[in-house]
Amino acid sequence: MEEMKNYKRADLHMHSTFSDGTKTPEELVRLAKGNGVELISLTDHDVVEGLSSMRDAALRAGIDFVNGIELSAGFADKPIHVVGLGFDETNPELLKQLEDTQTKRKQRAVEIGRKLEAQGFKGIAEGVYTKVSNPSLVSRSHFAAWMLENGCVKNSNEAFMNWLNPGAPGYVPIEKISVPQAVELILGAGGIPVLAHLGRYKLDEWKIQELINLFKEAGGVALEVTTGSHNAKQTQAVLELVRSQRWYASTGSDYHYDTSRYLPGLQGDLPSDLMPVWTLLGNKINSNLRQ
Ligand code: AMP
Ligand code: MN
Ligand code: MN
Ligand code: MN
């Protein structure tokens, strides 16, 4: 058996123009390579279309690649993100669910557009599509981008707080799969489920443990520790959990655009005492996994 590589630097969470990022997979690889990344994944929201370009670009650049995705799930009325790594991107059950999620996103976008037009954002219902780079994947981020471009908000956080988040006038709920369903889809496609940016969810401590238990019972094995979606305190809290409960650890910048907290690869390497998730990925690395 080939010996498992120990990567000094990995980035297993980032977004491209195939979802709500502003860089192409090729540009992401260039940025990551420049920052010393040795193993990369692309984890666009609810789509797999960017994976083949990312794989080709990574292999050309001489860095290792593994398939990724970030599935939108729900728990206790909160959006929870489950990352999948090293799965078969042609798995029919997974693709069927992605299509369903994409359709619901499109329907939600029409309603968000209608609500925001009624709030005085003239032209947003149509205009948002100038910000959407993959017609299969429309996100609240694209509405925030339109608002920013049209000078309606100072930054995208303001767009979410004032207009797009629950309780705000442009909020439209969307039906989501459960966390166990997300885990099962990834496992069913031969992948490794990772609970994304756990420190970011605004849940009581006992609810967090309930979420983790649910994730584990369904077959989840890894938590993201260093991520662009955690501040230092949140990273510390998850790090303690990972050490005390012996979880596998993942890491990723969650890079979307130039104003993201970290550029690809710069989210902070995993502490060396942790069990990195890539020890589970084995021959899924640099494979296209198509059957
Ligand atoms: P959606 O999946 O369409 O509901 O949109 C969620 C996406 O919006 C996330 O993946 C983030 O990229 C982005 N997002 C969520 N909250 C904020 C925020 N407060 N500021 C900026 N971007 C955000
Ligand atoms: Mn996003
Ligand atoms: Mn996320
Ligand atoms: Mn993300």
Image (cartoon, helix red, strand yellow):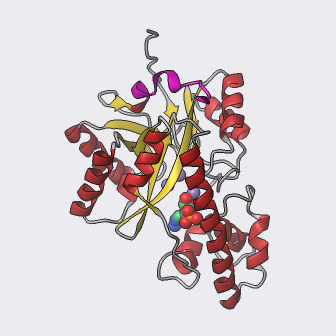
Q: Looking at this rendering, what residue extends furthest in the top direction?
A: 1
In the rendered image, the quadrant that contains the N terminus is: top left
Give the x, y percent position of residue 284.
52, 26
In the rendered image, the quadrant that contains the C terminus is: top right
User: Is 158 left or right of 142, judged from the image as shown?
Assistant: left
Q: Foreground residue, 21 or 284?
A: 284
* Rendering quarter of residue 58: top right
Give the x, y percent position of residue 113.
68, 79
Count the marks: 0
* Rendering quarter of residue 127: bottom right
- The vertical placement of 4 against 28, above or below, is above
Give the x, y percent position of residue 61.
69, 24
Q: Can the viewer see residue 66?
A: yes
- Residue occupying the point 55% across, 47% down: 94
- Residue occupying the point 59% across, 74% down: 159
- The vertical placement of 112 against 252, above or below, is below
Q: Is residue 290 magenta?
A: yes
- Residue occupying the point 69% across, 70% down: 148
Q: Foreground residue, 92 or 236?
A: 92
- Residue occupying the point 39% across, 55% down: 179
User: Is 198 left or right of 135, judged from the image as shown?
Assistant: left
Q: Foreground residue, 241 or 278?
A: 278
Task: Find the magenta span and give its range.
Answer: 278-291
Q: Can the viewer see residue 230?
A: no
Q: Is residue 35 magenta?
A: no
User: Is 63 left or right of 251, judged from the image as shown?
Assistant: right
- The vertical placement of 132 against 127, above or below, is above
* Rendering quarter of residue 163: bottom right
